[in-house]
Amino acid sequence: MDLGVRDRPFLIVGGTGGMGLAAAEVLVADGARVAVAGRDAGRAREAADALGPLAVPVTGDVNVSGEADRLVAAAVEELGGLAGIAITTGTGLEAHSRLEQATDEIWSEAFDDVLMGTVRAVRAAMPHLVANGGGTVVTTGAYGMRAYHPDRLPYVTLKYGVAAFTKTIAREYGPSGVRANCVCPGAIETGSLQALRAQLAETRGLPPEGLLEQLMVEEWHMDVALQRPGTPGEVGDLFAFLLSDRAAYVTGAIVNIDGGTTF
């Protein structure tokens, strides 16, 4: 499917790996110009180089006050404008804590990582999108925000905040031509889950096939209809679609991509 994004500029925050990089790959393949943003300058450069001449790297940490404004400004300067932004960050491990484990410091760090990184990036991008005559915002929630997960209390709570924030942006800025949607992935086999699969294989002395799937059912209690984790590419396709005009009448949506997970 031609997404109709040729020559249009997009910023992917968290675009140096995983779902963000996969989304950038889809956009670039259809001729879009993409800025991939990450905290590590070397990794951002490596990702942009791999994507080819339509991609540029930008570096910054949206968890830090003021950094999102600088990062977005750098992307706009490099790209010559901004038609859309996706934020795929916000997965800090310490946020996956129980109530009795989650100290004030953990809650504070999770607040910046899971929620405020998204808020800052969208806030910095919005004047450019409005000046552009409209644009698109895609944020990252989690399927778990609709599930009972006492082991992930700060994470789940703040992902609810991301979803509420996104729906409010969709409502408030719709008259300015801005669409905003929130993608909620389930278990996606990005680098951390790939490493976990390999670790399970080594620890148990078994082939890696099926081990992660077994863990998902027996320990994580995830009843997934498709009986497997998703791939970054599958989520990247959805991000790219929502950023494009192919989704021109989709806004304020909370879209699960979880293989049919029961919750």
Image (cartoon, rainbow, N blue to C red):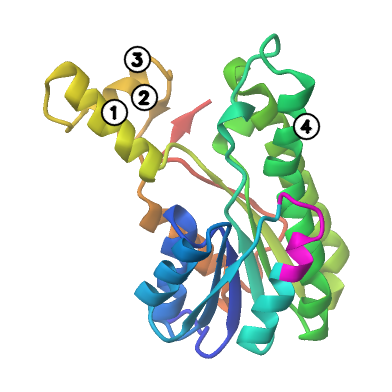
Which is closer to the viewer, label 2 or label 4? 4
- The amino acid type, in three-letter code, at marker 2 is Met
Specify which label sits upstream in the sequence, 4 or 1.
4
Q: What residue is drawn where x is 59% and y is 25%?
A: 96
Is label 2 in contact with label 1 (beta carbons under 8 Å)?
yes
The image shows residue 256 at horizontal and vertical percentages of 54, 45
Q: Name the residue under label 2.
A: 216
| Mark 3 vs mark 2, CA separation in Å | 6 Å
**Cα–Cα gap, marks 2 and 1:** 5 Å
Q: Distance between the residues labelled 4 and 1?
A: 33 Å
Instruction: Out of 160 and 42, give the one closest to the viewer.
Output: 42
Question: Which one is earlier in the sequence, the residue at label 3 or at label 4?
Answer: 4
Q: Mark 1 points at which residue?
A: 213
> Mark 3 and 2 residues: CB-CB less than 8 Å, in contact?
yes
**Kind of residue indicated by mark 3:** Glu
Q: In this view, does 209 lie above or below 125?
A: above
* Tag 4 and tag 1, C-beta contact below 8 Å: no
Q: Which of marks 1 and 3 is nearer the N terminus?
A: 1
Q: Are marks 3 and 4 in contact (CB under 8 Å)?
A: no
| CA–CA distance in space, label 3 to label 4 | 32 Å
Q: Mark 3 points at which residue?
A: 218
Relative to the observer, which residue lies in front, 77 or 2? 77
Quote the CA–CA distance across marks 2 and 4.
Answer: 29 Å
Name the amino acid, label 1.
Glu
Q: Is mark 1 on a helix, strand or loop?
A: helix
Q: Residue at x 84, y 60 (%)?
A: 171
Residues in magenta? 63-70
Q: Is mark 4 on a helix, strand or loop?
A: helix
- The correct choice, above or below, for 197 with respect to 129 in the image is above
Identified at 45% across, 32% down, the residue is 261
Question: Dot 1, how many residues are within 10 Å of its Cα: few (below 14), some (14-19), or many (20+)?
Answer: some
**Measured from the top left, where is residue 81 in percent x and y?**
69, 86
